[in-house]
Amino acid sequence: MASSFPSSQPAPDPKGEKPVEAEDTATLIALLAQDRQWLLRQLDGGRWSQWRLDLAALERELGQMLDQANERFPLG
């Protein structure tokens, strides 16, 4: 999905209050990566077997999204 914001400038806050800073973006990416790892551990541990295929697909999509976000907003 293409953004209408130039990559050199921060995107505005969804509420329109202030720009989203790179630090905030990096923090969000890191938190989502932790959530993805937690989900993967739960699936590998046999939880939610009735939804395993759907949750595994969600985990893969989240991983792809995080890879794209890391390319756009490198952590350091």
Image (spheres, grey):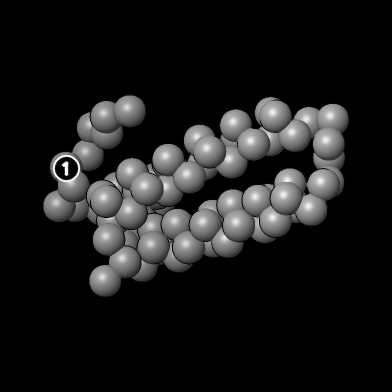
- Residue 20 at x, y percent in the picture: 35, 56
Residue 14, above or below 20: above
Answer with the quarter of the image where residue 75 lies. Answer: bottom left
- Residue 32 at x, y percent in the picture: 54, 54
Residue located 60% across and 31% down the image:
57
Q: Which of 36 and 72 is in front in this view?
A: 36
**The C terminus appears in which quarter of the rendering?**
bottom left
Q: In this rendering, does residue 67 appear at all?
A: yes
Q: Nearer the viewer, residue 61 or 49?
A: 49
Q: Mark 1 points at which residue?
A: 6
Q: Is residue 3 left or right of residue 34?
A: left
Q: In this view, does 76 lie to the left or right of 27?
A: left
Q: Which of 6 and 43 is in front in this view?
A: 43
What residue occupies the far bottom of the structure in this picture? Answer: 76
Q: In this view, does 52 lie to the left or right of 3?
A: right
**The N terminus appears in which quarter of the rendering?**
top left
The kind of residue on which mark 1 rests is Pro
Residue located 65% across and 51% down the image:
40
- So how many labels did they put on this image? 1
- Residue 27 at x, y percent in the picture: 45, 65
Under tag 1, what secondary structure? loop
Mark 1, other Cα within 10 Å: few <14 / some 14–19 / many ≥20: few
Residue 60, above or below 30: above
Residue located 78% across and 31% down the image:
51
Residue located 84% across and 30% down the image:
50
